[in-house]
Amino acid sequence: MKPDNRPAEDPGPLDLVGRAHLADPRDASYTLARYPPDPGFGDLVRGFWVPTWSVPPGEEAPQRVLQHPVCLLVVADGYARFSGVSSGLATTTLRGRGWAVGLICEPATGYLITGQPVADFTDRAVDLVEVLGPPGEELVGRVRAAMAADPGSPAAQRSAVQAFHVTLARYLPVDEEGLLVNRLAALVEGRSDLTRVSQLCAELDLSERALQRLVHRRIGLTPKWLVQRRRLQEAAERLRVTRTPAVELAALLGYADQPHFVRDFARVTGMTPGEFAARHRR
């Protein structure tokens, strides 16, 4: 297992973590290593990210994320959390020196881990041990022991990532409904032509009511939100790496007109597309 140690300020187009992470290219306070899941874990895990940071005293480094439709498991030196999907813009503020090891779940995984509808965790995080019980205590202990000496070491990071694999093995194989919701998310994220809920229903041969129930239980939001999140992530990516005018970008993303696109983008990110491009373009 080899880490992807891209510089934090250059996430790269279409990168899983970089597409969601609205990294400020001026922010040099952290480095980010990325690891794929082990073979056989692809239905549970999208990947791992391991940031290490050093922020000057008295300063802060906000990290803003347009989260994918998945839950997150994060163990750091000072906390361990299970997070549901953030419907808006998720922000984590880095201070001082630190590290974290994060697991990006597949959409199927949150329900398997919690044993309850993932909608119960939308826009909130809880202590990881509260969700996992004694295996969670073991996981946190193993991750912190692995990262204690040198959190920047690839060997330490690989050991921490393996601790997650050991804990997650009990949830394999993924159930049929879980595989279905994974397929749904892959369709939405990979097909920019799917812009209406009726199209998703046709692709999966589900009624609209059945699709709504599936997404509520396994992701915690709505099919319409899935489409909207994919649009916003694509918009943010294009604004960072191209100079596509907003009117053209709105058409590419399937918006009826530019004002609707600008309004949706600003409502979630807090910036107009022009303001976002000025700050985040590489």
Image: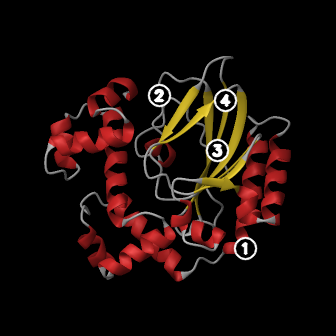
**Which label's residue is closer to the chain start, 4 or 3?**
3
Front: mark 4 or 3: 4
Q: Label 1 vs label 3: CA separation?
A: 25 Å
Q: Label 3 vs label 2: CA separation?
A: 22 Å
From the viewer's perspective, is 145 left or right of 276? right
Q: Which residue is mark 3?
A: 3
Secondary structure of the residue carrying numbered label 2: loop
Given the image, on which type of amino acid does mark 4 rest?
Trp
Q: Label 4 vs label 3: CA separation?
A: 17 Å
Pointer 4: residues within 10 angstroms few (<14), some, or many (20+)? many
The residue lying at 25 percent from left, 61 percent from top is 195
Q: Which residue is mark 2?
A: 24
Q: What label does residue 53 carry, if any?
A: 4
Q: Label 2 vs label 1: CA separation?
A: 38 Å
Secondary structure of the residue carrying numbered label 3: loop
Q: Where residue 40 appears, x then y in whole percent? A: 63, 69
The residue lying at 45 percent from left, 70 percent from top is 216
Q: Out of 152 and 135, give the one closest to the viewer.
A: 135
Q: Which residue is mark 1?
A: 170
Q: Where residue 148 appears, x then y in whole percent? A: 84, 39
The residue lying at 40 percent from left, 41 percent from top is 13
